[in-house]
Amino acid sequence: MKKNLGEKVVAFNKKLTYSGDLPEGFDVLNPFFDNPETLTVMSSFYKKFYNDHNQRKFVIGINPSRHGAGVTGVPFTDTKRLKSVCEIEMTSAYTHEISSVFLYDVIQQFGGPEAFYREFYINSPFPLAIVRRTPKGHLNANYYDDKKLFEAVKPFMIQSLKDHISLGLDTSEVFILGKKNAVFIDKINSQEKFFDKMTVLEHPRYIQQYKSKEKQLYIDKYLIALNKVK
């Protein structure tokens, strides 16, 4: 029997591993190997919201944070929103991630998680958490923070995007979160011709951190962009 989209995503995540080189000072965290409960809650999420064969639009983040998908295995979803909005509880960790706050405000105004996830699939070109080692401990890092880092992970990113698309996503329009992210995705798209159109939106972390007083304007901007596909 043909796997539905949720089953395909779970299978993809279970096999997800990065074995390439990284520049000195950077590490990759794989939540699916680090915490057994991550696999459980991630599987519950995709079974709940992606238990069908419908085509979705692709929303592309940067790479998971160590407090969001780096714990839950669900992009832009910390444990607080996993429980309060998606009604899936994670008992082995408790995280608050500011990007998750904004995105779930968008999701609620879109019509709730069932309505949103029925139309969109969120993931990242580098779908594992990248951290930088510092004297104070691990800090979140973006794949584009260091030129050598980007060059090291670029082949993995291209393959990852191919794998996501092969799940059965609609490639006529893609939504890129983060302007700097879009610059690098555009470089890859020019080479690989993955997507017909790229719509760029400000990253949730940027909005929460620097534009919180204008938050509703940005939520409206997201809703206008995303509702075009209805």
Image: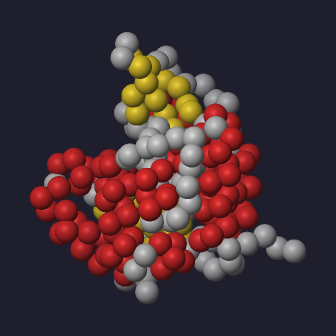
From the viewer's side, name the closer residue of 11 and 176.
11
Residue drawn at x 82%, y 73% is 2
Give the percent coordinates (x, y) of residue 68: 46, 46
Q: Can I make out residue 205 in this image?
A: yes
Quadrant in which the C terminus appears = bottom left
Position of residue 143 relative to residue 7, above or below, is above
**168 sits to left or right of 222:** right
Percent across and percent down for residue 11 are 74, 55
Q: Residue at left 37%, top 73%? A: 108
Residue 76, image quadrant: bottom left
Q: Looking at the image, which is closer to me, 185 or 164? A: 164
Please, which residue is most extreme toward the left here? Answer: 213
Q: Quadrant of residue 55?
A: bottom right
In this orientation, does residue 196 appear? no
Residue 96 in the image, given as x and y percentages of width and height = 38, 46
Please state the horizontal and vertical placement of residue 191, each as a whole percent of the image: 52, 53
Whether residue 146 is situated above or below residue 9 in the rendered picture:
above
> In the rendered view, does 70 fall on the left or right side of 178?
right
Which residue is located at x 37 percent, y 47 percent? 97
Q: Nearer the viewer, residue 62 or 149?
A: 62
Vertical order, 22 against 68 (above or below): above
Q: Please indicate whether residue 53 sits to the left or right of residue 137 in the image.
A: right
